[in-house]
Amino acid sequence: MNVNTNIKNDNLVSIYSLTLQELKDNLVASGFKSYVGDQIYDWIYKKDIDDFDKMTNLSKQAISFLKQNYFFDEIKINTIQEDKDGTVKFLLELHDNNLIEVVLMSFDYGYSVCVTSQVGCNMGCKFCASGLLKKVRNISTGEFIKQFLLAKQYLYKTKGENLSHMVVMGIGEPFDNFNNLVQFMKVIKEQKGLGIGGRKITVSTCGLVHRIKEWADLNNQVNLAISLHASNNEIRNKIMPINAAFNIEKLLEAIDYYLNKTNRRITIEYIMIKDLNDKKEHAYELIEMFKNRLVYINLIPYNPVFENSYARSEKCKEFYDILKNSGITCTIRQEKGSSIDAACGQLRSKRLGVL
């Protein structure tokens, strides 16, 4: 079910779902000056105000117009977990009582937040906690923005720090919520708003080939990560149902399209699972696959999910060395939140009684 939650039943539109120009166009069409849009954006994104009545430099007429046409998305913090490494995981409750997750992480380059794109996930990856609960609906553009705002406000309140980076790698498949995702990118990059540059954002997909090509055509400067997790179709078929529709050959063709169109490096995500995809032969298959492509491979230590039998590989360093010595740019992902439910979907699944 793809309900447009940017619009309420009373036809109010989420104020968070509008770019600055869209807001200005609506204001001008209703007889207001264009600069009122700048004032509203300043209240929302610079002063963290989510109440039209508190926008004290607006006229009564402007406030009345806003109330009659727009709403602020409401998301409550249900649970907060914090790891000793500073990672914070939020279980958030949406207006319709659905639950989603957001993770705030600290790195050498600053703070980054991982946001959710769907309530549940239909991709069904066998190793992932998110897929244990099927998709209920898409996250709206406004709910995307509100996730970021909650993390931003929490970080500033508790640490006095600014939130500078974002990954769309939480619950759900972002490219299965394509239109809201694209609008989210436009809003979050607004310089008079949150002002997060495209190069500080990464969006991950499990491999919706047609959407990868559409994303390339947008040329929005946002980083792309692809969840590959296997070096051949036999293994990928076992762990990622999406491979039945978009096998590795089709995925590589989409990768080439993206690289030719954007000349921007792609991150290849590869979860290391014991005795499944961590053998030397798998490393050499990856080398053959990517030796002439502009990618880097991110090896990810596996966070076990009790609903399956997969275990963490102990061969990350050996696998890394094989790739590196063959000229493949690669990293081993720095683990975050190891003492809390930081793996995608774990906290939500536990709360809903699935784990």
Image (cartoon, rainbow, N blue to C red):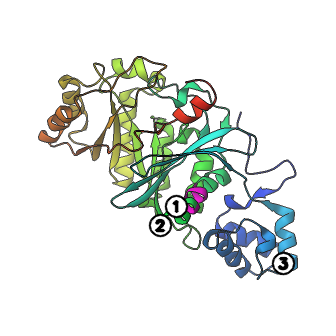
Q: Position of residue 255 (x, y in %)?
A: 37, 41
Q: Residues within 10 Å of mark 3 (few under 14, many from 20)?
A: few
Give left or right: position of 309 versus 189: left
Res 273 quadrant in image: top left
Judged from the image, the secondary structure of the residue bearing numbered disc 2 is loop
Extent of the magenta region: 148-153
| CA separation in Å, label 2 and label 1 | 6 Å
Name the amino acid type tagged 1. Answer: Leu
- Cα separation, mark 3 vs mark 1, equals 38 Å
Tell us which disc is closer to us: 2 or 3. 2
Q: Are marks 2 and 1 in contact (CB under 8 Å)?
A: yes
**Helix, strand or loop for the magenta stretch, by majority:** helix
Nearest-to-viewer mark from 3 and 1: 1
Tag 1 residue: 155
**Where 129 falls versus 32 (above or below)?**
above
Residue 312 or residue 206, whichever sits in front: 312
Q: Is residue 261 left or right of residue 134?
A: left
In this rendering, is residue 159 above or below 279?
below
Return the residue at label 2.
161
